[in-house]
Image: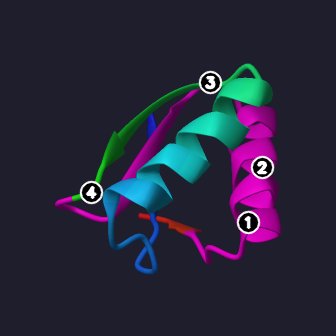
């Protein structure tokens, strides 16, 4: 799994929005609100797709 830092994720509503968009992309992921991270399970293409989806939602993210 590749862990992404998502520092702008602050609440459960953020988690809901991220879950909805990543699920629609058919990605396997795990979200930690406490750590402000999203872990992506998959290839580099999956990680790139997740970063692009988060960016479209207005969340900056980077690999840890």
Q: Is residue 36 visible?
A: yes
Which numbered disc flags the more N-terminal residue, 1 or 2? 2
- Tell me which corner region of the image, top left, top right, bottom left or bottom right, holds residue 31: top left
- Tell me which corner region of the image, top left, top right, bottom left or bottom right, holds residue 10: bottom left
Q: Look at mark 3 in the image and give the residue it sits on.
A: 42
Residue 43 screen position, x and y as percent: 69, 28
User: Is residue 42 shown in magenta?
Assistant: yes
5 vs 22, left or right, is left
Q: Look at mark 1 in the image and give the residue it sits on.
A: 57
Q: Look at mark 4 in the image and give the residue it sits on.
A: 33
Single out the mark in the foreground, 1 or 2. 1
Q: CA distance from mark 3 to mark 4?
A: 21 Å
Which numbered disc flags the more N-terminal residue, 3 or 4? 4
7 vs 59, left or right, is left
User: Judging from the image, what secondary structure is the residue with disc 2 in?
Assistant: helix
Q: Residue at x 57, y 49 (%)?
A: 18
Image label count: 4
The span picked out in magenta is: 34-61
User: Judging from the image, what secondary structure is the residue with disc 1 in?
Assistant: helix
User: Judging from the image, what secondary structure is the residue with disc 4 in?
Assistant: loop
| Relative to 29, residue 12 above or below | below
Badge 3 crowding class, 10 Å Cα cut-off, few under 14, some 14 to 19, many 20 or more, is few
| Relative to 24, residue 50 above or below | below
Q: Look at mark 2 in the image and give the residue it sits on.
A: 48
Q: Residue at x 81, y 58 (%)?
A: 52
């Amino acid at each position: 799994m590749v862990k992404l830092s998502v520092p702008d994720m602050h609440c459960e509503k953020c988690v809901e929005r991220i879950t909805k968009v990543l699920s629609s992309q058919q990605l396997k992921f795990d979200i930690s609100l406490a750590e402000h991270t999203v872990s992506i399970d998959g290839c580099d293409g999956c990680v790139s797709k997740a970063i692009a989806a988060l960016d479209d939602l207005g969340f900056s993210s980077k690999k840890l």
